[in-house]
Amino acid sequence: MLYRRLIPKIVVESFASKDSKGFRSILTRSYSPYRVVGDPLSQIKIQQSNLVDEIMLVNRVRSEFDLNFCNLVLQACEFLNSPLLVGGAITRTLHADMIFDAGADKIVIGQNRGDRKLLENIATKYGVQSLTISVDYTDKDLESGFEDFFRRELSLGYLNLAGELCLNNISKDGRGEGPDLTLVDIFRSETNVPIVVGCGISTVNQIAQCFEIGCDAVTLSTFLSQTDQSIKQLRSHLSLLGVHIRTKN
């Protein structure tokens, strides 16, 4: 039996005040912050209590690697039993080293997925299974056609270096209108690595639809924050629909 994965995604940004300096969890729309939702460590502990198979922690700032973010990863890993996937402006092998040294199990590269040397260095040092490639795009990127978009992505040369692919339509992020599944079959035709879909999910049926067309996992952020459903409850609902979710229970 093939088990699918539900991956809570926690997006953070740094903030400073007179009393403290650290990170706070946020919800995004089209990758722009629109609501603060609390303390990331508290959220990670809640997800850990649900025995999730994996947690994704992403620093929203994409322009410059934040050394303080490594401290947050370290704090999270002190009590985590679930694997932690971490992303956020990783532009050098040294950045990846620091994230892995802090305890991360996998890293995600998005904006720099065309940097083949970076990907090769990480894959050689930590193994292909440790590298998730995030394909972040917008509706505008698809205006010339899905096949044309895929050919541009194929030319970047990352498919044989990815442990898994995460497809994210930024235009749908945080809007609850349903995920974009148009590229799943196209990417699936060229690779056997797991495919993860995120952005736009707002119902259990939409999650089930992702799995029905061949996705291996979905990431959930706004959905978990704006509903009363936990990962445990989602597993139960999806099981009734015939979808079996991997669990540590």
Image (spheres, rainbow, N blue to C red):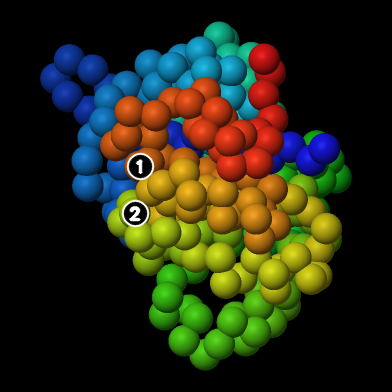
As rendered, which of 190 and 99 lies closer to the eye?
190
Indicate the quadrant containing the C terminus: top left, top right, bottom left or bottom right. Answer: top right
Q: Residue at x 67, y 24 (%)?
A: 247
Nearer the N terminus, badge 2 or badge 1? Answer: 2
Identify the amino acid type marked 2: Gly
Q: Which mark is residue 46?
A: none
In the rendered view, would you say 146 is above or below 24? below
For disc 2, the marked residue is: 176
Q: Residue at x 75, y 58 (%)?
A: 117
For disc 1, the marked residue is: 222
As rendered, which of 71 and 131 lies closer to the eye?
131
Q: Quadrant of residue 101?
A: top right
Q: Is residue 243 visible?
A: yes
The residue positioned farthest toward the left in the image shown:
18
Residue 26 lies, in percent from the top left, at 30, 37
Question: Is 10 on the left-hand or right-hand side of 217?
Answer: left
Identify the amino acid type marked 1: Thr
Q: Is residue 111 visible?
A: no
**Element type at mark 1:** helix
- Residue contact between numbered discs 2 and 1, judged by CB atoms under 8 Å: yes
Residue 124 lies, in percent from the top left, at 85, 45
Residue 146 lies, in percent from the top left, at 59, 82
